[in-house]
Image (cartoon, grey):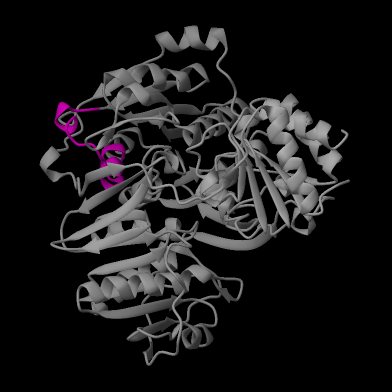
Amino acid sequence: MKILVTVAEVAAADDEFEIDGTAIDERYLTFDLNEWDDYAVEEAVQYSEEHDDVEVVTVTIGPERVEETIRQALAKGADRAVRVWDESLADTDVLDPATKAELIAAVAREEDPDVVLSGVQSGDYSFGATGVTLAEQLDMEWAAVVNQLDIAAEEGVASVHRELEGGVEELTDVELPAVFTIQTGINDPRYASLRGIRQAQSKPLDVKSLADLDVAVEDLPLSLTLTSLYEPEAEGDAELFEGSAEETAGKLGELLREKGVDA
Amino acid sequence: MTVLVVAEHRRGELRDVSFEAITAGRELADETGGDLHVAVISGTVDEYAERLDRTGVDAIHTVANGEEFNHDVYVQTVEQLADGVDPTYILTPNSVNGLDYAPAVASRLDRPLVTDAVAFDVDDGLTVTRELYGGKAEGELDVAGDRAVVTIRGGEWPAAEGAGEAAIEAFDPTIDEDGVRSTVTGFQEVGAGDVDITDADVLVSVGRGIDEEENIEIIEELADALGATVSASRPIVDNGWLPKDRQVGQSGKVVTPDVYIAIGISGAVQHVAGMKGADTIIAINNDPSAPIYDIADYGIVDDLFEVVPALTEEFGG
């Protein structure tokens, strides 16, 4: 049994930031493992701990500098990692879901996994579409926004809960092999142990170029171009209480009493 | 050219965003001088079609196949509809189910996909406006080629109104049953706990800004002092610090209390969807640019660890 987990390094912006052209100035960005992927990795690692002969392989798209982030998944228990990159991708600021899926699919065809786990979305572009696009390209079944996953490998089926809007979950049986996009809260992601971090340094991390994967950059969709980036206009007209904490709490207390709040 | 909107329903009800998608679809059709078609798949489609027949809809395709959403059926159906209707743009809600089939439709039809659109413009091709970086920035994306699949964010377009004169036609796709590899077996309401936050007059709601599980205590003390109920945003529930039945937002509960005090909550769109109907919204958050201030009536831009205990004390807690 092999589980392939897609992982990405994403950028989070500080509360205050500056925009340089169509990008946030790097000084105001913090790079980390995508939150949703952290849950996907945990889900795969837990399954591998509970079952025999399960290999967990991560796949990511990104330049060399993302390796430090990707090793976090190895430190948490993934067995090995694959990183796809090509300098010809360096000038594109948006990798659309189809492009990402095509690159990951090329790796998936080599790895031939039984299950693919992908975060529901990335924290930066948040397309929320790579996993389902990947499933379609691999001719696998899928389920999006999964917050409970029970894999019955021998029966070739997984029973999932999909988190719909409004506190309702859909219960669905999905034939394997399949891609599942994993929602936050599905489990409790672990922190990497010191031992895990040490071990991660010696776990395999293979780098694949587009040529290695037999993919030509001209054939990638690359269908989206970011033409502007700006801070959304604040729409609010909130009345702000000012002063020390005691003063603001006093003013807010007065307001709350006017509204009839008082135990 | 034609715009095709795919409506969404669940357990016998059309979802509001279906009517918003009609407005968005009409806007896109108007910009290009085209027709607006709507597809409604599975369930009581004739009844749905009557309701979807709003001003500006030119044609409605009803597809009677099963009761509930199944992404394999939707993908095959939209693919075959697109063959005949030849839509320039296909629009679906950016919902959990929208994201469960729209990417596969785009992939199968070999079209670009843009999700979570909040606005668009057609001028020498399609440009889509959407949020990035968790709502901290917004950007415009140019979409290559002349066809696309777009999912639209709920609450951004008004619901379509008025009676339409759409031609309603049944469409009978050929569903390859071998390609239907998932089965919906049921639904489950989550978080039926002992507290019903939708019933509370005053909610003290806590978010990521609380930092640590043990700090939840100061929120509970405040709620006690105010005679209020504690609720939370998603990260608090994901961390297991409060149970799921306390979650306010798109995937949690929709609440409409008299007073909603948002503490350390940034106000992501998914959260706001669950509490924007509160009468009075008060934000306590040290980031003045947090989107919660876009909808708050009152605010304190300060350290919650200073303000919350002071407020508790104010009420004798």
x, y percentage for residue A162? 57, 53
x, y percentage for residue B194? 85, 50
Who is closer to the viewer here, B56 or B264?
B264
**Count of numbered labels shown in the rendering:** 0
Who is closer to the viewer here, A82 or B311?
B311
At 71% from the left edge and 45% from the top edge, which residue is drawn? B244
Q: Position of A71 compared to B226: left or right?
A: left
Q: Quadrant of residue B110?
A: bottom left
Residue A124 seen from this side: yes
Q: Position of B39 compared to A54: left or right?
A: left
* Residue B267 vertical placement versus A40 (above, below): below
At 50% from the left edge and 44% from the top edge, which residue is drawn? B291
* Residue B256 vertical placement versus A43 (above, below): below
x, y percentage for residue B6? 40, 71
Who is closer to the viewer here, B297 or B251?
B297
Q: Quadrant of residue B1?
A: bottom left
Residue B171 seen from this side: no
x, y percentage for residue A126? 40, 44
Examine the structure image and report whether residue A95 is included in the region drawn in magenta: yes
Examine the structure image and report whether residue A210 is included in the region drawn in magenta: no
Residue farthest along the left direction in this orientation: A218
Q: Quadrant of residue A154?
A: top right
* Residue A43 vertical placement versus B291 (above, below): above
Q: Position of A95 compared to B53: left or right?
A: left
Part of the protein shown in magenta:
A85-104
At 40% from the left edge and 31% from the top edge, which residue is drawn? A13
